[in-house]
Each structure stands twice: as structure tokens, then as C-alpha cells.
Image (cartoon, helix red, strand yellow):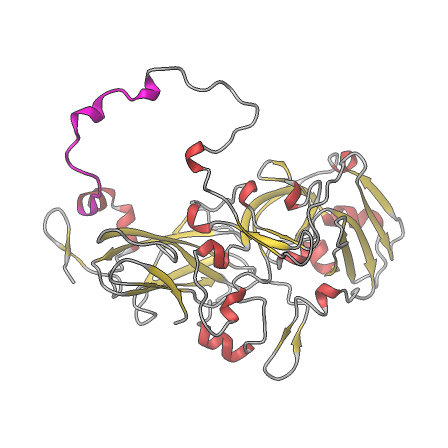
Amino acid sequence: MKSLHTNDGAVIAPAADGGLLDRRLFLKKGLVFGTFALASDHIPADELQRTAAMLTPGAPFSGYGQPSPFEQGLLRNVAANAAVAGNGASMTPLERLAGTLTPSGLHFERHHNGVPKIDPALHRLIIHGKVAKPLSFSLERLKRYPMTSHLCVIECGGNSFSGWHKEAMQGTPGSLHGLVSCSEWTGVPLSLLLHEAEPAADADWIIAEGADAAALNISIPRAKAMDDALLALYQNGEAIRPENGYPMRLVLPGWEGVTQVKWLRRLETSDRPVMSRNETAKYTELQPDGSARQFTFSMGVKSVITAPAGGYRLTEQGYYSLSGLAWSGQGRVASVDVSADGGKTWAEAELCAPVLPKAYTRFRIPWQWQGQPATLQSRATDEHGNMQPTRARLVQERGQAGYFHYNAIISWQVEPDGYIHHIFA
């Protein structure tokens, strides 16, 4: 491979094989731009002239901002179930986004029976069951309570489900792994409301139910409800969008998406779980020893390279800023390693601030591609030492009868002609 040099001729040592470079090159701006300049060094004279947009007044004010008309293709990947009305999912286009916050309109969706149209003036949240004081809250009453915010990931337990298949499916990062999003959720700490209701000492479970046509209900341990659970009323600073749970939803940082009930209408305290369909027939996994995993609330440590990645083609050789997302349901991401040779050698990526617990962490590393085949992978480790497993290890431990909680290392194969596709490696 051809060596890279600084402006004064010194050789830049690779951080790992396959063209990965030291992440700290990002911090040496003069070096980076001097070494990897991608722009043309010749400016045509007509590019210095005023453009058409500078010669006439622009568009008038609007009541609510919309994306540029040149960004109309930035949409979720929709996968509806034709056999059941309103059942299916839409995935966030991870490869088209930057930073760590998912726009509300691109947050992934998973509906079991469609999006209900709820009049906020009529909607009520009821807390009942084994409590001393059954309570009913209107939306306006809830807005008078103290509020807090969590910037956190919500990930469907079935995200990346195709990883359990015997052959790798093809697609973009978003179409294969986009049942995950990160938003700032604002609302009332659930512990405040439960304290007011005075649960019985043996009320160890909270059964949450939504106001959709499926009446989705699921059991939450009381300990989590009293810890960091949030009754969210706002998403990214505005009222929650209908498909994300308007006018209120449960947010449980770090836990699988199905527990974070949308269109929340009822919290019943109980001394036992409800054993609903979504915690017995679904969202459970048969293991190699014949047992089944159940109540697998917390999501594992995970990462995915989003660019360059599956579904795209490198059009020319040279420098690329390899980028991706990492997160953990246990806490903060501590490090992300990247490999360009299928895991034979690894280089540490730069973690971009902010690095928050149970939220997206953006990582980047410079990569020099000179037309060689490459297998791109990322491997995240969280602050508790949990490391993203290889696919071989995950399958060995869990078998292939499952559908949920797939968090193995994701691999993208770069071919000599620049095309990138998904592989198991």
C-alpha cells in the first residue's frame, strides 16, 4: 500500500491494517487538510459570480419549518404487514443522518395495530391496582408537575433480527439495523406519580397499557419505574408525534422498545406480571438448552458503521472519514475499535462529544482506501466492560432460534470496484 506523508514528508504510520489511520489526525487540522485535501485546487471564474439565489428575495416565513426540497428522499424505510391492519415497522435511515439526535419525524416506528388518533383534552392516565390512592391525570394536570429530560436511545428488541438468519441479508444500515433512534424525552418522573398513589409494599410490578387498538400491555418491575422511568410528554422539545406515542408515552432508558408503551393510558400496580402475549409468546427466545429467555429488558452494547456502509459504492480511491453509532443499555460507551481487515487488527476510533449514558455516541476514524478488498467492522465496549460480541460467539451462546436482542459485530465487505455489501464474518 502506498504510504501517506505529512506536508513536510514524514510518513504517517497506519493505526491498523487495511488503511485505518490514527484517530488523532482529526485533531491536527492543518495536517489533515494538507494531507487529504479532497477539494479542487482550481476555482473556475464563474464560481466566484453571485448565484441565482443571491439575486432575488427568498421564500417568506413559514409557520413550521420543513426539510429542503432537495432532501425529500430522506425517509424512513417502511415494512408494513399486509396481513394485519396497522401492523409493521418503519426504520430510521441511519446512513443519512449525522450527530447523535434522531429527528422526530425519522424516529423508527413499531405498531401492532396502527396509530390511534387521540384527543389530548379527553385522554387520561390512570394509576390503580394495589395502591392506597387510585389517581386519574389529565394532560394539563401532568404539565403542572416538575419535569426532567433524558437523551436516550430507544431500540426495538427485534432490531437487526436478520443477524440470526443463516445468510446475510442485503441493505443499508438503516434498512437492516434502523429499529433504533435517539431523542431527548421530557416529562414527569414516574416515581413522583407512583409516590402520590402510594403503592402497596408487595406491588413489585407495574402493568403499563396503551390506548391503541391492540391495547398493548406489558409488565415493568417497580424498581425500574422508581429509578429513571419517565412519563414523556415531549420529544426533542415539542409534543410527541402521534406515531411516537402522542400525547404521552413511557420512557425506560436502556430497555427494549416494547416496554416503553406509547399512548399510555393505564398503570396498574400488581404483585405479579400480567404474562401478556408480548412477554410470553413474543419477545422471548428459545435457547440451545431448550429454555426460554423471558423479561430480557436491558439492551446490550452495540455499534454499527453507518458510512461508508452497505448499499453504497466508493466512487474513487483516497481518504474517507469512516463514521458510525455506538450505544449501550447499561451506561456510557467507553471505546469503539474499528477493523478494516475483518477483525485481524483493530484501531481505536475517536468518540465525538457528548458521550452520554444509554444514548448514541458518534465515532469516527480516518481510513485510506486504495482499491483493496476490505471488511469493515466496529466493536463497542461500555463503561462496565461489556464488549460487543462476535457473531460466532453470540450464535454459540444463544443458538439461532431467536429473533430479539441481536448485538453482534456487524460487517461490511468493500469490493475492489467500490461496492459495499453486508456479510457475516
Q: Residue at x 54, y 65 (%)?
A: 161
Give the residues in magenta.
Answer: 35-54
Residue 6 visible here: yes
What residue occupies the far top of the structure in this picture? 56
Q: Indicate the position of residue 209 as horizontal and vertical percent values.
A: 77, 53
Query: At 15% across and 36% down in the image, what residue appears?
Result: 41
Q: Nearer the viewer, residue 350 or 88?
A: 88
Reply yes or no: does residue 74 show up in magenta: no
Q: Is residue 48 magenta?
A: yes
Image quadrant where residue 348 sits: bottom left
The single residue placed furthest to the front in the displayed view is: 82
Foreground: 344 or 210?
A: 210
* Residue 214 left/right relative to 55: right
Picture quarter with the C terminus? bottom left
Q: Front-most of 370 and 417?
A: 417
Q: Which one is nearer the viewer's eye here, 37 or 22?
A: 37
Q: Position of residue 25 (x, y in %)?
A: 26, 50
Q: Position of residue 338 (x, y in %)?
A: 35, 62
Instruction: Name the residue furthest left.
Output: 9
Q: In which quadrant of the rendered view does residue 317 lie?
A: bottom left
Q: Residue shown at 78%/58% (left/top)? A: 207
Residue depicted at x 71% and y 38%: 146
Label count reads 0
